[in-house]
Image: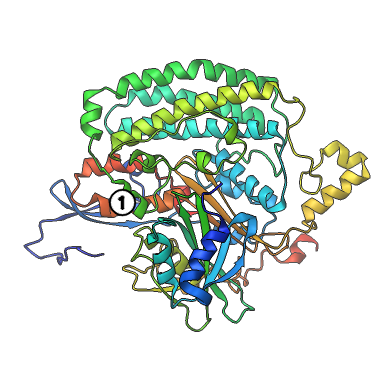
Amino acid sequence: MGKISNEDLLKRISDKFQDQVTVVGEPFGLLTLETGREQIIDVLTFLKEDPTLQFIFLTDITAIHYPEQENPIGVIYHLHSLVNNVRVRLKVFLPAGDVRIPTATVLWNGANWMERETYDFFGVVFDGHPDLRRILNVDDMEAFPMRKEYPLEDPNRVDKKDYFFGR
Amino acid sequence: MQNHPVFTDNDPQNELSTLNLGPTHPATHGVFQNVLQLDGERIVSGVSTIGYIHRAFEKIAEHRPFYQITPLTDRLNYCSSPINNMGWHMTVEKLLGIETPKRVDYLRVIIMELARISDHLICNSVLAVDTGAQTGFFYVMEYREAIYEIYEEVCGSRLTTNIGRIGGFERNFNEIAFTKLRKFLKEYPLVLKEFENLTKRNRIFIDRTKDVAAVTAEEALNYSWSGPILRAAGVDYDVRAMEPYSSYEDFDFEVPVGTNGDVYNRYLVRNEEMWQSLRIIEQALAKIEKEPSDIFHADVPDFYLPPKEEVYNNMEALIYHFKIVMGEIPTPNTEVYHAVEGGNGELGFYLVNDGGRSPYRLHFRRPSFINYQMYAPMSRGMLLSDAIINMSSLNVIAGELDA
């Protein structure tokens, strides 16, 4: 396992950010933290540049949608400290009317397409992103398809109605 | 795109020519496009367009029970689909807390390493084809066929394998599978060596690949590269060694590392990884001898479908069958991230579960997608012919690119 325990990691982060970072849990040993969009870049910068933590590897950026929550869109970062072999997960929840967050491309070039994908599917606007366009879907699409209100199939289709299948 | 020179069509100053590399260009080996501005043979700028085979797997996965998501993972990196299948099974097993028997782990290791060999041999031989050496490709291609025949004995299919189940395998390996595996282990090293002799010290091959598209370790990490191309740049990050899954900690193998991250180093790393995979398979075969030969899945009736005869004759099996198919078994309300070392790098599965019959959210960390984003920036100033072999050495698989 990793060279830094989750307690030490949490202590270092909370020494620096006090109550701006809250703990969500430790599912399967992966420390999960929640923070706000005001300090997300500061937190990421600290994690990346702190000489003992060295979370230099950005594993992934993605998002999740909880329509019933007050802040429904969550942006999720996975970081990996290759030196200590420890992972950490960061979550930022954003309000429905204002789905904006600063870009992480200032820290990692690799965040570019991850953020474009997140924008494409969830409509999260990454402020300061150099080239925020859709990436997998067609450019003139209007919906953000991974949001929960977007149905998997066209609801106007009639060829899959239950009565065709004797149900 | 930044630095993109803008000329109108009838501007007499415009001496650049536009080349559409893709979507269906033989050199891209997949459906994705690069619009390149060329000054003679030099690339001035490039814009990558992807998404031509986007199939919305993450959305579909939110509507399917866990065991029906395995066939979706087949279609990510279809050159090594067993790794994707088993990465997904292990993610679900981690979520459900299923402990697999050692024999299952070792059988999985055999299949995953075979998949790695088939992935790397395609990549390296196609790299040779792109540098002009067609012959080696045909030598090793025969052995991809041999690997597919082993898959066929285990799961019945070849390319999109859907191999294994949550908890283990759908059936035990038969004797033919082991015979074919032993035959492969005996014959393939000779062919690999022959292929190596064709390319490794070949003056033309070295001239074409050495110092082409060299990437420093810092750049590679900055772009979140993983897999052989990151190791070729000198970073010894291999998920199998860093976070062993499926009992990789029981095996003795080396993680080959390159020095300057150019195309030749990537070729060498992949080549050495094939030798290491062969070593791992040999060890796994020896270890399996010591395990009870009738175990091929974990004892988890809640998630592992009972044999069909039992379903018809045994009420308990029928109940389990019904509950599994209808997705009526409660699952933990939590989230899990599990990564495996795919053919192209860290293949991650981020699964958020709400206790329902299908995932609340499933995200694939697809190494090709993340590796490929550096392609257009790094092509600037490169010769077109170098950019082509750079692309084949990145081993971009369109299925994994688009999900």
Dividing the picture into quadrants, the one containing residue B315 is top right
Q: Position of residue A46 (x, y in %)?
A: 41, 65
Horizontally, residue A65 falls left or right of residue B276, namely right
Residue under numbered circle 1: B219
Dividing the picture into quadrants, the one containing residue B334 is bottom right
Dot 1 falls on a residue whose secondary structure is: helix
Dividing the picture into quadrants, the one containing residue B8 is bottom left
Q: Residue at x 34, y 49 (%)?
A: B220
- Split into 4 quadrants, where in the image is the N terminus of chain B? bottom left
Q: Amino acid at mark 1?
A: Glu
Q: Residue at x 46, y 74 (%)?
A: A142
Q: Which colour assignment does the render follow?
A: rainbow
Closer to the camera, B221 or B357?
B221
Q: Residue at x 48, y 47 (%)?
A: B346
Extreme bottom residue here?
A97
Horizontally, residue A148 falls left or right of residue A102, namely right
Is residue B29 visible to the viewer in this orientation of the structure? no
Q: Give the answer, above or below, for where B270 lies relative to A41.
A: above
Extreme left residue here?
B12
Q: Give the answer, above or below, for where B382 lies relative to A59.
A: above
Q: Chain of mark 1?
A: B
Horizontally, residue B338 falls left or right of residue B66, namely left
Q: Position of residue A134 (x, y in %)?
A: 41, 66
Closer to the camera, B338 or B187?
B338
